[in-house]
């Protein structure tokens, strides 16, 4: 789930493309086509796939070249034995309107949604989130059909890449007198929303799975070594400190 693109209740990323629900968000992954109404094609420019793809690929290249956070994730993936080739492992494609990106474990490929992740910030958020899933798949052999595994990687992505006091305030999960709890609640809410978007689970089943794995996965801060604070220099720090965690040597 990529941060900073749309309202939390309106947009989320789906990762488990082996699951039928996940495939529906990325129809062109398996040979189908995106359905577009004539009104949106005429007045919003939808359907210009080649131009969207070119813009998306430029944004991906710029983010990979400039972002210390993405450079760290690239280093971590390479050190773990899963070096990223931009042409092979990152694909700009049209997607459902409710997603900005996803991770296709079957193809070991990150999808950036060229029709919804249209800004540099959106591409950065999608890449950062999905790289956590790719890292978990490489390092821990995550089984995306296993709900506990899926929740764990969603917890880690929310924990490392998205949740902060301000984002939790916007989501309604924090208040000024609950500062110590707001980050955990943001992570729980985001992880639950992500998993229930691609899994046919009851709220009770999803929350039970969340409680089974939350503490272990919340405390796993690899490969950053810290939770990023909003409006801080943490992103630069984690890049400088990457050698302390064994990344950046290869």
Image (cartoon, grey):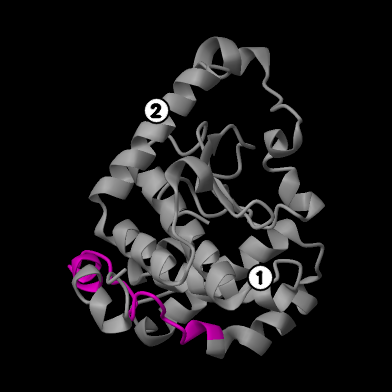
- Depth order, front residue of 150/211: 150
Instruction: Report whether residue 24 is seen.
Output: yes
- The image shows residue 24, relative to residue 136, as above or below, that is above
- Depth order, front residue of 179/147: 147
- The image shows residue 78, relative to residue 92, as above or below, that is below
Q: Which residue is mark 2?
A: 55
Q: Which mark is residue 150?
A: 1
Please provide percent x and percent y for residue 70.
34, 57
19 part of magenta stretch = no
**Element on which disc 2 rests:** helix
- The image shows residue 150, relative to residue 27, as above or below, that is below
Of the two numbered discs 1 and 2 on the same chain, state the one appearing first in sequence. Answer: 2
Residue at 50% of width from left, 77% of height from top? 185
Residue at 47% of width from left, 80% of height from top? 184
Please provide percent x and percent y for residue 48.
53, 17
Magenta-highlighted residues: 217-238
Location of the C terminus by quadrant is bottom left
Q: Main secondary structure of the magenta part?
A: loop
**Element on which disc 1 rests:** helix
Instruction: Report whether residue 189 is seen.
Output: no
- The image shows residue 14, relative to residue 114, as above or below, that is below
- Outermost residue toward the top in this view: 42
């Amino acid at each position: 789930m990529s941060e900073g693109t749309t309202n939390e209740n309106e947009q989320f990323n789906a990762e488990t493309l082996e699951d039928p629900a996940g495939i529906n968000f990325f129809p062109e992954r398996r040979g189908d086509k995106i359905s577009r109404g004539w009104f949106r094609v005429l007045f919003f420019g939808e359907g210009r796939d080649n131009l969207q793809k070119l813009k998306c690929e430029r944004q991906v290249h710029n983010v990979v070249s400039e972002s210390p956070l993405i450079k760290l994730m690239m280093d971590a993936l390479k050190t773990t034995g899963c070096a990223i080739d931009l042409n092979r492992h990152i694909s700009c494609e049209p997607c459902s309107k409710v997603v900005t990106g996803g991770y296709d474990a079957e193809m070991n490929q990150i999808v950036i949604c060229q029709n919804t992740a249209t800004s540099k910030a959106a591409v950065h958020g999608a890449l950062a989130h999905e790289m956590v899933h790719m890292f978990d798949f490489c390092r821990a052999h995550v089984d995306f059909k296993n709900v506990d595994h899926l929740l764990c990687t969603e917890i880690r992505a929310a924990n490392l890449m998205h949740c902060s006091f301000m984002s939790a305030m916007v989501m309604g999960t924090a208040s000024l007198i609950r500062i110590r709890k707001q980050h955990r609640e943001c992570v729980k809410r985001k992880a639950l929303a992500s998993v229930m978007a691609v899994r046919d689970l009851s709220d009770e089943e999803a929350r039970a799975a969340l409680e089974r794995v939350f503490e272990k996965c919340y405390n796993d801060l690899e490969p950053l070594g810290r939770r990023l604070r909003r409006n801080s220099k943490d992103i630069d720090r984690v890049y400088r400190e990457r050698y302390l965690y064994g990344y950046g040597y290869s």
